[in-house]
Image: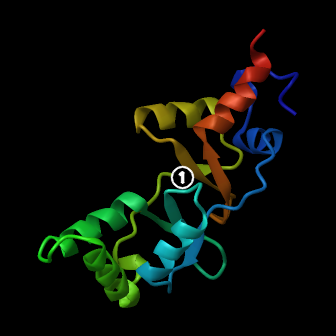
Amino acid sequence: MVDNKPISDIRVSEVMAEVGKTVEPATVSTEASLKNAVEAIVEDSDTRKVYVVDNEGKLKGTVTLETLLRLAGYRLGVRSTGVTSLLRMLAEISDDKVTEVMSSPIKVLHNEMLVNVTKLMVEHHLNDLPVVDDDNVLVGELNGLDILKASTKFWS
């Protein structure tokens, strides 16, 4: 546990264990369609992204809500606005693959020092990061709130 350690010696895996990270991040396979990505985001109302993993669970990319909305905007730009156009666009993306729009994620290793991860989040204006093991298998997601929760143990 992190209680008796200096904050500079804490690792990501310790924070995840401390805050009880039991919720799995939203994921889809590399074979998934954009429709599957939309469904994964909609089903997990706490997320604004879906991680793309291969058959071994290795992290390959990220599809964010922002990317999906941008794609919708491009497609909606040539049509009349409204809910009908949005639903039509969502139906059309069913054949598009997540690999066509995913981005390479900034990720961290489970044994990375929390200080380094916090710096990375601040420098890149990130609220959360995918956490992978030594084989690049997605093991969870660390967010800024997790860091704050763990940090409060050191405030007196």
Q: Position of residue 141 (x, y in %)?
A: 63, 52
- Counting every numbered tag in the picture gives 1
On the question of residue 52 being in view, the answer is: no
Mark 1, secondary structure of its residue: loop
- 49 sits to left or right of 136: left
Farthest-out residue, bottom? 95
Residue 75 in the image, given as x and y percentages of width and height:
21, 75
The residue sitting at 59% across, 69% down in the picture is 43
* Mark 1 surroundings within 10 Å by alpha-carbon count, few (fewer than 14), some (14 through 19), many (20 or more): some
Residue 141 or 83: which is nearer the viewer?
A: 83
Q: Quarter holding the N terminus?
A: top right
Residue 54 sits in quarter: bottom right
User: Measuring 58% from the left and 59% from the top, which residue is drawn there?
Assistant: 45
Q: Is residue 132 left or right of residue 122?
A: right
Name the residue rendered at 14%, 77% in the picture: 79
Q: Which residue is mark 1?
A: 107
Q: Position of residue 5 (x, y in %)?
A: 82, 23
Point 47% across, 67% down: residue: 61
In the displayed structure, 110 sits above or below 152; it is below
In the depicted structure, whether residue 129 falls above or below residue 77: above
Confirm whether residue 48 shows in the render. Answer: yes
Q: Amino acid at mark 1?
A: Lys
- Name the quarter where the C terminus is drawn: top right
Q: Is residue 32 above or below residue 74?
A: below
Q: Nearer the viewer, residue 4 or 16?
A: 16
